[in-house]
Image (cartoon, rainbow, N blue to C red):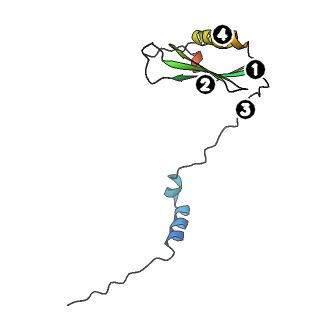
Amino acid sequence: MLQLNVGISRWQSMYPDVQSYSKTCDVCQRSKINYKKSMLPLNPLPVASRPFQAIHIDDKTLPRTTKQGHCALLCCIDAFSKFPIVTPVSDLSAVTSAKILTRDVISLFGVPEVIVIGDLVSLVPCSRN
């Protein structure tokens, strides 16, 4: 019977060697994902000192149109108390946004000093079916 003498060897410094090689490898450096994304400096929002002094307006499009014909939600949030006013809308036009702002916010709480608009999508007319 023939006996094979297979020697099992162990690479003691494999992890540090691979780590140092990957730091110097050009292909490894180019294919690496940068997880430290650079962020633009944020502009500070005005701090409200009383309710409905400043409001934030944004819209949230729905995945599909409802049976009532609504395609989005118009969200008005008070900056002081974080009180939400959410209204379903059938279109995202500026006229519809102004009517809802007048009916649901200004007529109940008065004219705010500051209105912060989210991504300005609600000011562009669009139709979604």
Q: Amino acid at mark 2?
A: Asp
State the residue position of label 3: 43
| Kind of residue at disc 1 | Gln
Q: Which marked residue is nearer to the observer: mark 4 or mark 2?
A: 4
Residue 15 image position (x, y, % from top left):
51, 69
Q: Nearer the viewer, mark 1 or mark 3?
A: 1
Q: Name which of mark 2 and mark 3 comes first in the sequence.
A: 3
Q: Amino acid at mark 4?
A: Thr
Residue 83 appears in which quarter of the rendering?
top right
Are circles 1 and 3 on residues that touch, CB within 8 Å? no
SS for dot 4: helix
How many angstroms separate mark 4 from mark 3 (CA)? 27 Å
Amino acid type at circle 3 is Asn
Q: Are marks 2 and 3 in contact (CB under 8 Å)?
A: no
Q: Residue furthest right?
A: 49
Residue density around tag 3, few if under 14, some if 14–19, many if 20 or more, within 10 Å: few
* Disc 4 from disc 2: Cα separation: 20 Å
Query: Mark 1 or 4 closer to N-term?
Result: 1
Q: Is residue 3 left or right of residue 68?
A: left
Q: Which of the two marks, 4 or 3, is nearer to us in this view? A: 4
Sequence-wise first label, 4 or 3: 3
| Residue 74's disc number | none
Q: Secondary structure at mark 3?
A: loop
The residue carrying pointer 1 sits among few (fewer than 14), some (14 to 19) or many (20 or more) residues within 10 Å by Cα, namely some
Residue 90 lies, in percent from the top left, at: 50, 13
Earlier residue among tags 4 and 2: 4
The residue at which mark 1 appears reads as 53
